[in-house]
Image (spheres, coloured by chain):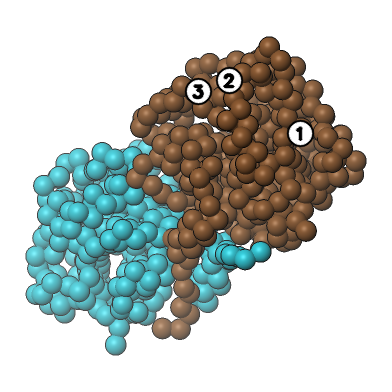
Chain colours: A cyan, B brown
Amino acid sequence: MNNKLLVLGTIAYDGIEAPLGKRDKILGGCATYIGLSASLFENDCGIISIVGSDFKKEDFKIIKDKGLDCSGVEVIENSKTFFWRGRYDKNLNSRTTLETKLNVLEQFKPIVPNKYRDSDILVLGNLDPNIQLNVLNQMSSRPKLIILDTMNYWIERYEEQLEQLIKKSDIISINDDEARQITNEYSLLKAAKKISNLGPKYIIIKKGEHGAMLYNEGKIFIIPAIPFEKVYDPTGAGDSFIGAIAGYLSQTKSISFKNLKSAIAYGVVVSSFTVQSFGTENLVKLNYKELSIRMEELKNISEFQVKHNF
Amino acid sequence: MNNKLLVLGTIAYDGIEAPLGKRDKILGGCATYIGLSASLFENDCGIISIVGSDFKKEDFKIIKDKGLDCSGVEVIENSKTFFWRGRYDKNLNSRTTLETKLNVLEQFKPIVPNKYRDSDILVLGNLDPNIQLNVLNQMSSRPKLIILDTMNYWIERYEEQLEQLIKKSDIISINDDEARQITNEYSLLKAAKKISNLGPKYIIIKKGEHGAMLYNEGKIFIIPAIPFEKVYDPTGAGDSFIGAIAGYLSQTKSISFKNLKSAIAYGVVVSSFTVQSFGTENLVKLNYKELSIRMEELKNISEFQVKHNF
């Protein structure tokens, strides 16, 4: 049997303005992206989140149809779902938040259903560290694997809580700028070492268009992102990445360095589909065969032979 | 027998100011870095360059001891060698030129020795495109492989000559910013395609700390740079990269996509040694065994397994 997976995060409506198009109000939120990506690898996956009564039935259907258990998603009557609207610059390198309406998020006090308190893998999606800690503390036993995702916004506001969380995590996913910010080191190798000294066994540094780096006890692995001529919407790329990693690990179980490398490759591939459409458009259509084909492409892109004797 | 290699470029004295140290006047210049790197792979390699009478015997000895033929290096009496002094910013991402004394370069009218007019591989190091064209035109027959390196300074000044050169080259090596500047495309995939339409079969885009990308007829290869905690001096990294590629290709001959991938991996490895010391300090000491060991490390850093059935 596969490992049981629990995902904490937001379910949101997003407004996206990007060079190649615009969407007013589409399904988003880190739990959505993580869950949909994890669901590509068969598993028993529960979502802990909160939505308002405006959350559409068809959006619930999208999530549930992937086999994701929504019993941990609270629906608040007469309230609205978390809404975020942002604009990407022309090279998709930076984004400006145009609007954030926390709505139901302001009263989010998650309760983990009994069924998921003994989950093997816990993914703490990018969210208020206090809520991440709250969910972690509800687990009946320490999950075999705790994966933490966070960002600069939380680092600046809740340093102490974040330190606790980092200490308790096995895998932390963070982007390059944020790794540098936390550690005050420019070298990503130095930054990863420093974060690793805070607790986590595996440090995953996301480098956007440059791919990702994995660090573990002096060993490193670097994988490129798949380059495209057109990127539609980077929203959820990091969440898809971490969701695929969690999904893959829930199936293969081993958390050896070698298996983590493969997990990260799947993360890169799944997020490459995400950025090629707006929101979750591609992610909900994606099947395992397409995933396998692109995995081979990624391998071809990054593989080379060493010739020692000429 | 290995292919005959001809390298055009500068031999210089450099002054370096970097976060981890300073050097007043050390051996540099693109022909020096390219030649020393190419010499790691046994071959018959001639250098076309110019120096002043101040150029030290011991520096000539360093170059000649590597088996590099200096019969094409003109020595101008009562003149000084090209001098460049620059300062790197604290993250080594950008550099400021503090001083440029062209000296002998102002009168550089290269003459290719007869012996090298039929070279199999011609490397046109980063230099005035008029001089690059001049040397290309002196070849008795078209070299099997023409490798062109250039930079923004020349792109802005000699667009027309550069276009001619690009058209005639098989491999062009250019950095990411410059590829974007030339093509007015942010996507490196689009940029590479556009440059490829100008002539060259292979486009190598250097991405600094993020490694390099190879493009050839729709196929791509991406390789990371080896990350370090400390980088001493990035000067000559791109030249070492291209020199190793040329040296490797002079031995293995095939210019298949597969072999180009290996060549680029050697380029990454040789330049990784270059940046870990000031100037050519590491490069002159480097031996083939160290190179082979680091090639295996690079392979480990970038290799992963694809599991299709769980």
Crowd class of label 3 (few under 14; some 14 to 19; many from 20; radius 10 Å): some
Marks 2 and 1: which is nearer the front?
Answer: 1
Give A128 or B53, whichever is nearer the viewer: B53
Drawn side of residue B229 relative to residue B53, left or right: left
Q: Quadrant of the C terminus of chain B?
A: bottom left
Question: Which residue occupies 27% across, 80% down?
Answer: A3
The residue type indicated by label 2 comes to Phe
Residue that appears at 50% across and 23% down: B25
Q: Is residue B34 left or right of residue A38?
A: right
Is residue B235 among what the camera can see?
yes
Kindly identify which residue carries mark 1. Answer: B71
Which amino acid type is shown beneath numbered disc 1?
Ser
Query: Tags 3 and 2 in contact by the CB under 8 Å rule?
Result: yes
Q: Quadrant of residue B258?
A: bottom right
User: What separation in Å lies between label 1 and label 3 (alpha carbons)?
Assistant: 24 Å
Point out which mark residue B62 bears: none
Secondary structure, mark 1, is strand
The subunit letter for the residue under badge 2 reads B
Quadrant that contains the N terminus of chain B: bottom right
Check disc 2 and report the residue beneath it. B83
Dot 3 or dot 2: first in sequence order is 3
Work out whether disc 2 and disc 1 sit on a shared chain.
yes
Quickly name the residue at label 3: B25
In contact (CB < 8 Å): disc 2 and disc 1: no
* Chain letter belonging to callout 1: B
Q: Position of residue A224 (x, y in %)?
A: 49, 56
Q: CA distance from mark 2 to mark 1?
A: 22 Å
- Disc 2 is placed on an element classified as strand
Front position among marks 3 and 2: 3
The chain under label 3 reads: B
Mark 1 is surrounded, within 10 Å at the Cα level, by few (under 14), some (14 to 19) or many (20 or more) other residues, namely: some
The image shows residue B26 at horizontal and vertical percentages of 51, 27
